[in-house]
Image (spheres, rainbow, N blue to C red):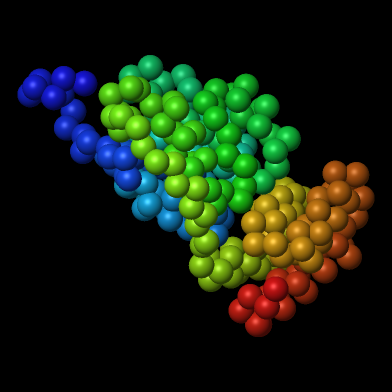
Amino acid sequence: MDTNDPFATNYPAPTATRPLLGLTVLVVEDSRYACEAMRLLCLRSGARIRRADCIRSARRHLQVYRPSVVVVDMGLPDGNGADLITELAQVDNEPSVVLATSGDDMLEAEALAAGAQGFLSKPITSLAIFQQLILSNLPADRRPPGLRTVVDEQVSPDEIAYHDDINYAADLLEGAPNDQVLDYIAQFLEGVARSVDDTHMENAARALAGRRAAGLTAASETAQIAGLIQERLATKMAI
């Protein structure tokens, strides 16, 4: 980028300690816990963060501004993240770096086929991995000059964010959720529970997903998840 060009975009210059300075990262993520991890990673890296919790919200953001980086969760409440990735990959004017994320590594191939330039496996806690994946896909003039020390710091989101995710799942379970909602609850809880090592919840969510995939009734599995949710809400994260 020619810094003498008065019409050039005026980005803050990245530095060795804040290599993503000047970037805006749009995180399309339904989990509060995962989004809190991304917020900490962006904060340590110098990037600004904005969040959309579904595809519809992300599209509203994209009508207003073009983020430098978009990180898309593959499992969203209103659709498959791969569909949004495909839309973003087809943008010709000022394209963003598009990354996918999921707790299911089996979805990496689908994300890359849709047009993602990289894949972040949940839980996303490594500062070095986060920075390197973004930097390797940026234009040369958006990267910090010279050598830099790679600090493999691990971020630790506040567990209150997981409590928010559990509360969200409780709201979804109210009444009589249909098959689509049950499928979503199973994949959502399995992913967020794995991120905080909540083994009981993760196993229960996997059991629900397995019954649903086999086309079997899952009343017992749904009741077990409802009970675990109530335990966690009552004790505020007694894992």
Q: Residue furthest bottom?
A: 235
Residue at horizontal 61 percent and vertical 51 percent from the top: 123
Q: Is residue 15 left or right of residue 30?
A: left
For the C terminus, the image quarter is bottom right
Identify the residue at horizontal 53%, vertical 71% (top origin). 160
Residue 58, percent from left and from top: 44, 41
The N terminus sits in image quarter:
top left
On the image, the x and y values in percent for residue 81 come to 58, 36
Is residue 213 found left or right of 234 in the rendered image? right
Say which of 5 and 83 sits in front.
Answer: 5
Query: In this picture, is 141 found above or below 131?
Result: above
Residue 61 appears in view: no
Foreground residue, 56 or 69? 69
Residue 12, image x, y percentages: 21, 38
Residue 119 visible from this viewpoint = yes
Q: Is residue 177 left or right of residue 151?
A: right
Q: Nearer the viewer, residue 137 or 162?
A: 137
> Residue 64 appears at what percent x and percent y?
30, 38
Q: Residue 217 occupies which quadrant of the picture? A: bottom right
Vertical order, 32 against 133 (above or below): below
Q: Farthest residue toward the top?
A: 92
The residue under the point 40% across, 35% down is 69
Query: Could you tell me which residue is drawn at 38 percent across and 17 percent down?
Result: 92
